[in-house]
Amino acid sequence: MLIRLIYCGIFIFTFFDIFYIIAAEVQNVNTALTQNNTEKIQFEQLEQLFNNFYPWLAGLYDPEEGGFYFSLKHKNDKQLQPDIESTAQAISILYRSGLLPEMPATFRQKLINFFQKRQDPNTGFFIDQNIERHNNERWRGRALSYSISSLSKLKAKPLYPLPGEKNTGANPNPYLSHFESPEIFQNWLNNRPWNNAWGALDQVSSQIPNLKLFPKAKRDQLLTILFKDLAKRQDSNSGLWGGGSPYRKISGAFKIAMVYKSFKKPIPRANKIYKSTLECLRNNKAEDICFVRNPLNLITMLRNDLGRPISNADKTQISNITIKNLAMFATDQGGFRGKLSAPLASAPAIYRNYHEANLNACSSAFTVRQLLYALSGMKVPLVSNTDVFLIIKKYGNSRYESYRTDYRSRIY
């Protein structure tokens, strides 16, 4: 009798155990289906934001210069020209769209010529023509990075040695003077605008291409100074650096995370930065498209330093907030604007149309798209249609309005 009761007990326990296992598995399946359906809806909404993008992009191309303008208003302003950053961002978009292999040879060569003729043979830097911003460390660093990257994507090289690649003897490169000694570099760091984390750390991260060009001994010396300085400035509670609004602090953290990753260093206090980033996303309005991109970029960089995977609940919330935020910057022109409101009249010329569709904002939008797919573990859909180059060839010199109604095929 006892044996029978024990046997029945084991059977009863096993039955209920199996029942709960099956119930749990059903719940997991339902949760997965709900998650997949939510993701499908989210990404359908995301893709709709890019429906009319490529004809807008074509309108920014200048076939004579071989480059792209910042915006349509810039193209119609005779005082402005295609610039390095906008052209590099257009190339990056075409690259991420899977279109570079289909690029016609003549179009490719014009783009190569655009960058090569802007390189200064004396300093090795790439300088925009008739653009006020080139005369500071930040813009020179960005132009250098963009130009090297673009030429590489186009399977070409600079015409002259890059900064730091040749011995200048008695005539050192004037654009690298802030690296002359450890004391001068430390003083340069101290003089960054640390009350604005985004501004300060953007200036620091813009020096990555310069630092990489130095011989190893000098580079290591400078990096030791930099990382020691950053360790002193990092807040132990939030994990962030510098001052400013939450989004400016998060944007600064993204910029400096680029430095850590570029030199294969772990990001310190990664979990605290991650927590601060989620709090910022949940509680603050994104007034700038960079505030849509930068948190997502930062989260992507933090993943390997968190010591744990990002939960599905967090992924869903991050994607939902980001897609809703990105939608605020989509325009009926087909591109994306950088700000929700117009900048001050005193702003530099390059920023005066930032609240209208422009390539800087569109580059951020494409980065957001790419990172959202990566966060969800999904493959990014690529474009494979040479029509975009036919549009550029046909409408490169035309106003946007003249081809918007003429363009009928959807390539996205």
Image: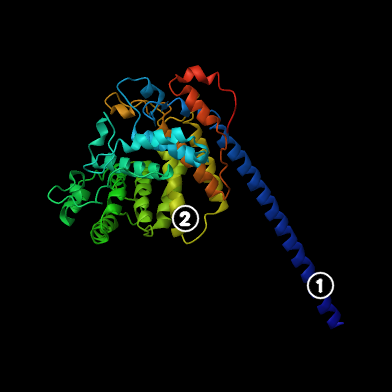
Identify the element where label 2 is drawn. Answer: helix
Looking at the picture, the colour scheme in use is rainbow
Dot 1, crowdedness within 10 Å: few (<14), some or many (≥20)?
Answer: few
Q: Nearer the viewer, mark 2 or mark 1?
A: 2
Task: Report x, y in % for residue 183.
Answer: 16, 55
Q: Which residue is mark 1?
A: 11
Identify the element where label 1 is drawn. Answer: helix
| Residue at (51% x, 43% y) in the render | 370
Name the residue nearer the viewer: 79 or 319.
79
| Residue at (44% x, 36% y) in the render | 108
Name the quarter where the N terminus is drawn: bottom right
Q: Amino acid at mark 2?
A: Arg
| Residue at (52% x, 20% y) in the render | 404
- CA gap between label 2 and label 1 equals 45 Å
Q: Is residue 285 visible?
A: no
Judged left or right of residue 196, residue 10 is: right
Considering every residue shown, the one lying at the far left of the view is 170
Task: Report x, y in % for residue 146.
Answer: 36, 41
Quadrant in the rendering for residue 294: top left
* Mark closer to the chain start, 2 or 1: 1
131, above or below 185, in the image: above
Considering every residue shown, the one lying at the far top of the view is 402
6, above or below 18, in the image: below
Name the quarter where the C terminus is drawn: top right
Judged left or right of residue 140, residue 247 is: right
Name the residue nearer the viewer: 273 or 17.
273
Name the residue nearer the viewer: 231 or 331.
331
Q: Is residue 400 visible?
A: yes
Considering every residue shown, the one lying at the far front of the view is 106
Kindly identify which numbered label has been placed on residue 303: 2
Q: Amino acid at mark 1?
A: Phe
